[in-house]
Image (cartoon, grey):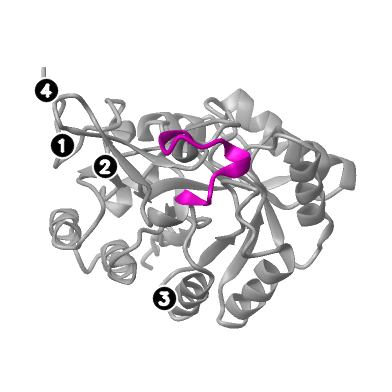
């Protein structure tokens, strides 16, 4: 009698919170497209700046219902940087709703979740979880999903998985998009325009993929997105799917860009299904009008701006 070999589960695809401030109608169109996209999970919410008020919690929940009706799992994300009582109230409102799961972006959200007795929440990529001990502590609070920090190498994710920490957790890694590298209570975009945060004229609306910053030598270096500093390059993790599953990874997070994102989703879907090998998938991404060169240095314990398309000059 033949023994059947159990196949590892296929990788899931998730779309993270929209990082840029696009016009309201464009955002609605974007999520309408996601309803039919080959993805499993959508994380909704304003995570960058509380002054971006086109969508309130009720609006995000209405979008969530539409996506859930289309078969998507929906999470609501809390703000990345909580700088005052208004932002903390926003966190409480997100936690108090019981219709959708919550992704905690920082320690304040974890505190509110614990006070509310909520369980089954997700740990966002900006929490400081870099080793088995930290993940074990966070998992003990009731988390069921973890998105590793974008700068954590794949080998470290594999080591954490091998340590047997919280096997009930779904592990996710950042697989596509410009990487948020730093956060500030001040607004980098407003400062660039000689404005302060409270009177910013909402200038980040002008930059659909953030504002590119170049070095003195004219090299693409960083990107400004309101209160965030992003990478100039576009992180694209396209390893052999089997290798990612062996590292304990069950889901890949994709972050939207202004152009060709539906094509990006199709490339990643074909790649995870084995219909498109990694080199071919990278070539397909290179042909798209992405906002920067492809990078993947962090995944391989190198400088983040390095990758198949970019190498550091020595």
| Disc 2 crowd, CA 10 A, few/some/many (<14, 14-19, 20+) | many
With 140 as the anchor, is 209 left or right in this view? Answer: left
* Distance in Å between CA atoms under marks 1 and 4: 9 Å
Q: Which residue is more in the foreground, 8 or 171? A: 171
Q: Which residues are magenta?
A: 191-203
Specify the label residue 233 is tagged with: 2
* Distance in Å between CA atoms under marks 2 and 4: 15 Å
Hey, which quadrant is residue 300 in on the image?
top left
Question: Residue 184 location, x and y as percent?
Answer: 55, 30
* Distance in Å between CA atoms under marks 1 and 2: 8 Å
Mark 3 residue element: loop
Does 130 sit above or below residue 292? above
Q: Which residue is more in the foreground, 82 or 216? A: 216
Q: Are marks 2 and 4 in contact (CB under 8 Å)?
A: no
Identify residue for label 3: 37
Label located before the other in sequence (1 or 3): 3
Identify residue for label 1: 310
Identify residue for label 4: 313
The residue depicted at 44 percent of the width and 45 percent of the height is 173
Label located before the other in sequence (3 or 4): 3
| Disc 4 crowd, CA 10 A, few/some/many (<14, 14-19, 20+) | few
| Disc 3 crowd, CA 10 A, few/some/many (<14, 14-19, 20+) | some
Question: Is residue 202 found inside the magenta-colored segment of the image?
Answer: yes
């Amino acid at each position: 009698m033949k023994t059947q070999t159990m196949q590892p589960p296929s990788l899931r695809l998730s779309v993270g919170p929209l990082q840029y401030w696009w016009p309201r109608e464009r955002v609605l169109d974007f999520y309408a497209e996601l309803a039919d996209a080959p993805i499993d999970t959508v994380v909704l919410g304003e995570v960058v700046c509380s002054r971006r008020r086109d969508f309130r919690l009720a609006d995000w929940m209405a979008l969530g219902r539409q996506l859930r009706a289309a078969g998507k799992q929906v999470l609501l994300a809390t703000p990345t940087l909580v700088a005052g009582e208004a932002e903390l109230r926003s966190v409480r409102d997100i936690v108090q709703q019981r219709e959708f799961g919550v992704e905690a972006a920082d320690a304040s959200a974890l505190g509110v979740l614990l006070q509310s007795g909520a369980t089954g929440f997700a740990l966002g990529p900006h929490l400081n979880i870099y080793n088995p001990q930290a993940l074990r502590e966070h998992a003990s609070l009731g988390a069921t999903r973890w998105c590793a920090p974008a700068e954590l190498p794949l080998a470290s994710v594999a080591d954490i998985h091998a340590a047997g920490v919280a096997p009930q957790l779904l592990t996710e890694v950042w697989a596509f998009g410009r990487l948020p590298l730093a956060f500030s209570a001040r607004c980098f975009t407003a400062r660039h325009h000689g404005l302060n945060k409270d009177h910013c004229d909402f200038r980040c609306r002008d930059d659909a993929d953030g504002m590119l910053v170049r070095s003195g030598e004219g090299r693409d270096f960083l990107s400004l997105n309101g209160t965030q500093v992003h990478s100039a390059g576009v992180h694209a993790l396209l390893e052999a799917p089997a290798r990612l599953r062996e590292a304990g990874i069950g889901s890949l997070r994709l972050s939207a860009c202004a152009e060709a994102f539906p094509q990006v989703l199709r490339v990643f879907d074909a790649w995870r299904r084995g219909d498109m090998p990694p080199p071919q998938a990278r070539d397909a991404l290179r042909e798209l009008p992405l906002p920067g060169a492809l990078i993947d240095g962090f995944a391989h314990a190198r400088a983040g701006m390095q990758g198949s398309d970019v190498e550091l000059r020595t």
